[in-house]
Amino acid sequence: MIVLVMLCGFLGLMADTAQLQYVRMRAQTAADAAAVAALHEMRGGNAVSMQAAAVDDAARNGVKGATIQVNCPPLSGEHSGDTTAVEARIVERTPTLFMAIFGHSSVTVLARAVAIADAKGGVTLGE
């Protein structure tokens, strides 16, 4: 009986972990897309629409209702202060199934991406 309870608990924890990993990957993909979209707006002289472009591209990549912050220049990391770089941060609360039993009904998932304009007109994603 104890083994059955332990097995069910382990399976529940695995389900939550898999769900959170999926949400994290989706948020990272959306952050990458948001940073690139904001960089394209900045390079096109539309600095005012950087945030809107980032939110739109994040939504196209499955992130809706999350907090999306665009910073130019990035606030932290290797490219902080670099005016040719744009940072996108996504903060998303996601519900849990099994961990809710232990008082963790949701978990905050964070994703960050930096898009850097190179000299040839291309874009590089960095940290």
Image (cartoon, helix red, strand yellow):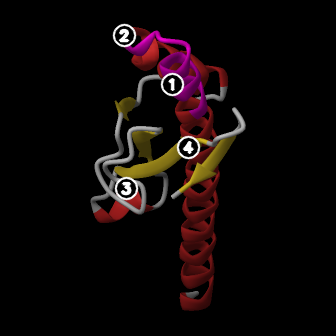
Give the secondary structure at mark 2. Answer: helix
Compute the Cα span from label 3 to label 4. 40 Å
Residue at position x 60%, y 73% from top? Answer: 8
Mark in the foreground, 3 or 4 = 4
- Report which residue position mark 4 lands on: 116
For the residue marked with disc 1, what is the amino acid?
A: Ala
Which label's residue is closer to the chain start, 3 or 2? 2
- Report which residue position mark 3 lands on: 100
The circle drawn on residue 48 is: 2
Quarter-wise, where is residue 104 in the image?
bottom left
For the residue marked with disc 3, what is the amino acid?
A: Ala
Does the residue at mark 4 contact the one at mark 1 (Cβ under 8 Å)? no
Which label's residue is closer to the chain start, 1 or 3? 1
Return the x and y of residue 64 as percentages of the image width and height: 50, 23
113 in relation to 45, above or below: below
Q: Main secondary structure of the magenta part?
A: helix
For the residue marked with disc 4, what is the amino acid?
A: Ile
